[in-house]
Image (spheres, rainbow, N blue to C red):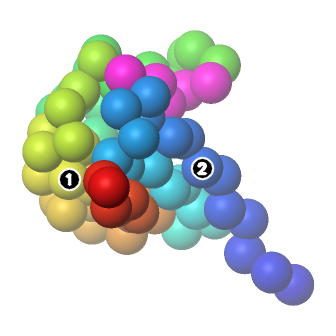
């Protein structure tokens, strides 16, 4: 069975937040670090718009389970 992958593109076109729910260990680091982006009570629970690309990368790099990852997009 293929692992579920949910994508949350940032409107700036530079980055897409990737979430693999089966990997998530609910450490809460994402919510504590960027509560304006990650709100487990909201749907969708990830809204990347309030953060910069750099802020998202820094937070995602601290995800202990690697349930959160990202794709960077080249700007032309």
Is residue 8 among what the camera can see?
A: yes
Please give left or right for residue 26 compared with residue 35 in the image: right
Q: In which quadrant of the rendered image does the N terminus lie?
A: bottom right
Name the residue: 72% across, 75% down. Answer: 3
Residue nearest the observer in this picture, 19 or 14? 14
On the image, the x and y values in percent for residue 53 come to 21, 42
Q: Residue furthest bottom?
A: 1
* 9, above or below 25, in the image: above
> Where does the magenta region start and end?
44-49
What is the secondary structure assignment of the residue under circle 2? Answer: strand
* Residue beneath the point at 32% across and 55% down: 76
- Asked whether the viewer can see residue 59, the reply is no
Percent coordinates x, y for residue 36 in the rendering:
30, 16
Q: Residues within 10 Å of mark 1 (few under 14, many from 20)?
A: some
Count up the numbered dots: 2
Q: Is residue 72 above or below residue 3?
A: above
Q: Nearer the viewer, residue 55 or 23?
A: 55
Rendered view: 53 above or below 35: below
Mark 2 or mark 1, earlier in chain: 2
Q: Quadrant of residue 48?
A: top left
Q: Main secondary structure of the magenta part?
A: loop
Residue 15: which disc? Answer: none
Q: CA distance from mark 2 to mark 1?
A: 15 Å
Pointers 2 and 1 in contact (CB under 8 A)? no
Residue 33 highlighted magenta (yes or no): no
Task: Tell me if 8 is positioned left or right of 12 in this view.
Answer: right
Q: Residue at x 41, y 41 (%)?
A: 13
Q: Label 1: which residue?
A: 57
Against 50, residue 65 (above or below) is below
Q: Which residue is mark 2?
A: 7
């Amino acid at each position: 069975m293929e692992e579920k992958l949910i994508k949350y593109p940032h409107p700036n076109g530079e980055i897409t937040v990737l979430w693999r729910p089966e990997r998530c260990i609910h450490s809460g680091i994402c919510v504590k670090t960027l509560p304006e982006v990650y709100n487990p009570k909201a749907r969708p629970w990830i809204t990347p718009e309030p953060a910069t690309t750099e802020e998202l990368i820094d937070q995602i790099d601290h995800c202990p389970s690697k349930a959160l990852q990202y794709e960077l997009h080249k700007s032309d």
